[in-house]
Amino acid sequence: MRNVTQQRETTAMNPSYFRIRLPLAAAMSRFSGWVCSSELEPPRDIGLSEAVSLACDESGNWRGSALYLYHNDGWTIFEDISGHFGSLPAAAWKSFAQNDSFVFAGYNDAIGYGELTVIENGTVLREFLFDSDNAEVNVNYGQLEGNPVEPIETWIEAARFVDEDEIVFSERGLFWLHGVIA
C-alpha cells in the first residue's frame, strides 16, 4: 500500500485520478477524442515530483488541466493534478469509458469532499459524490460487491478507496497539459 502523505508535499490532501483498462496509447487517443479542450503541450516524460511545478505558472496558478499518466497492471492511470475533472457526472465518464473498465476516485480532506465512479461494460456500477458543504449535489448510487471500503457513505470512505488503490502510483510518467475544461 502506498502512503499518499509521503508523495505529496501539501497541507491538505486532494488526490484524484481516473483509470481505464486500456493500453497507454489507446487511452490517450480515447481521451483526446473525448475531452473538450485542446492540448497545450504534448506529453513528456517526467518524475512524479515534477508534476505540480510543471502544472503551475510563475504565480502559482494552474496553467490548464494538468495530468500525470502512466500504465500499471493493464490500466492507464490519469492523475488529475489540477483537479479539473472532479464532479463530472457518471454519464460523462460513461462516454469516455465506453465498454471498458473505468474508475474515477478522489477526495479533498480540507473541505470534506469525496467521489467515486465505477463503470464496467458500459454500465455504471457505483456513483458516489459527497460534498459536506453542498449536500444537494450528493449522489449515492449502487454498491461494489467485494469492496472492503463499502459501504461508502461519507468522503472518508472515498478517501480510503483512493489511498488503498495499489494500482495508482508511479515514480515516472507523462505530464500532459490541456486547456481548462469547460
Image (tube, helix red, strand yellow):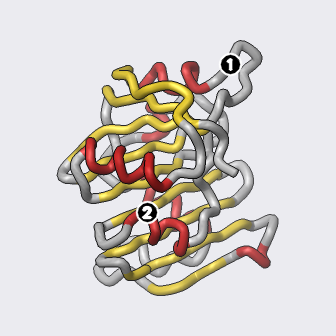
Q: Is residue 180 left or right of residue 133?
A: left
Looking at the rendered structure, the secondary structure element under dot 2 is helix
Which picture quadrant has residue 144?
bottom left
Q: What amino acid is at disc 2?
A: Phe
Residue at numbered disc 1: 57
Position in image of residue 132 (x %, y %)? 75, 67
- Please tell me whether residue 23 is drawn above or below residue 140 in the rendered image: above
- Please tell me whether residue 55 is drawn above or below residue 100 in the rendered image: above
**How many residues crowd around disc 1 within 10 Å: few (fewer than 14), some, or many (20 or more)?**
few
Please tell me which of labels 1 and 2 falls first in the chain: 1
Name the mark nearer the viewer: 1 or 2: 2
Q: Nearer the viewer, residue 54 or 164?
A: 54
- Please tell me whether residue 112 is drawn above or below residue 82 in the rendered image: below
Residue 167 at least partly seen: no
Looking at the rendered structure, the secondary structure element under dot 1 is loop
For this orientation, the residue located farthest to the top is 58
Position in image of residue 22 (x %, y %)? 25, 55
Q: Nearer the viewer, residue 91 or 156?
A: 91
**How many residues crowd around disc 2 within 10 Å: few (fewer than 14), some, or many (20 or more)?**
some
Q: What amino acid is at disc 1?
A: Asp
Q: Is residue 70 left or right of residue 137?
A: left
- Check whether the beta carbons of the residues at disc 1 and disc 2 lie within 8 A of each other: no
**Residues at marks 1 and 2, CA–CA distance in whole angstroms:** 29 Å
Q: Nearer the viewer, residue 141 or 100?
A: 100
- For image coordinates 65% across by 47% down, the residue present is 181
Residue at numbered disc 2: 96
Q: Is residue 128 left or right of residue 79?
A: right
